[in-house]
Image (cartoon, helix red, strand yellow):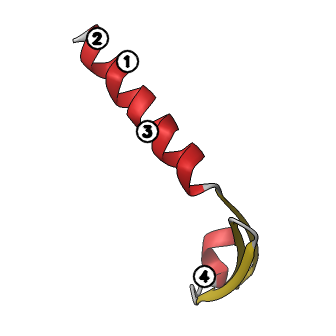
Amino acid sequence: MLLSSLSLSLSLSLSLSLSLCVCVCVCVCVCVCVCVCVCVCQYRVRACRDRLIIFVPAGKWK
């Protein structure tokens, strides 16, 4: 089982090194959460803006 987990981790690291993608996400939550993600993939910059609307009841914070 140890060998299989090692091979899996190696294959994942190889696939990640080949894709060369780095994503940075910033989330700001004030009753509503807004997330902005920027991904850089092999000299390409792709901006992805995702809004997650989560309403938090005021009673929950008390």
9 left or right, relative to 2 = right
Residue at the disc numbered 4: 56
Q: Earlier in the sequence, mark 1 or mark 3?
A: 1
Please tell me whether mark 1 sits on a helix, a strand or a loop.
helix
Neighbor class of circle 2 (other Cα within 10 Å; few <14, some 14-19, many 20+) is few
CA distance separating discs 1 and 2: 5 Å
Can you say whether 22 is above or below 10 in the image? below
Q: Earlier in the sequence, mark 3 or mark 2?
A: 2
Q: Earlier in the sequence, mark 4 or mark 2?
A: 2
Give the residue drawn at x 62%, y 78%.
59
Q: Please, what is the three-letter code of the amino acid marked with disc 2?
A: Leu
Q: Earlier in the sequence, mark 1 or mark 4?
A: 1
Q: Which is more toward the observer, 42 or 49?
A: 42
Q: Are marks 1 and 3 in contact (CB under 8 Å)?
A: no
Give the residue drawn at x 21%, y 12%.
1
Q: Are marks 1 and 4 in contact (CB under 8 Å)?
A: no
CA distance separating discs 4 and 3: 37 Å
CA distance separating discs 1 and 4: 42 Å
Please tell me whether mark 2 sits on a helix, a strand or a loop.
helix
CA distance separating discs 1 and 3: 10 Å
Residue at the disc numbered 1: 6
- The residue mark sitting in front, 4 or 3, is 3
Q: Please, what is the three-letter code of the amino acid marked with disc 4?
A: Val
Residue at the disc numbered 3: 12
Residue 62 visible in the picture: no
Q: Position of residue 55 (x, y in %)?
A: 58, 88
Residue at the disc numbered 2: 3
Q: Are marks 1 and 2 in contact (CB under 8 Å)?
A: yes
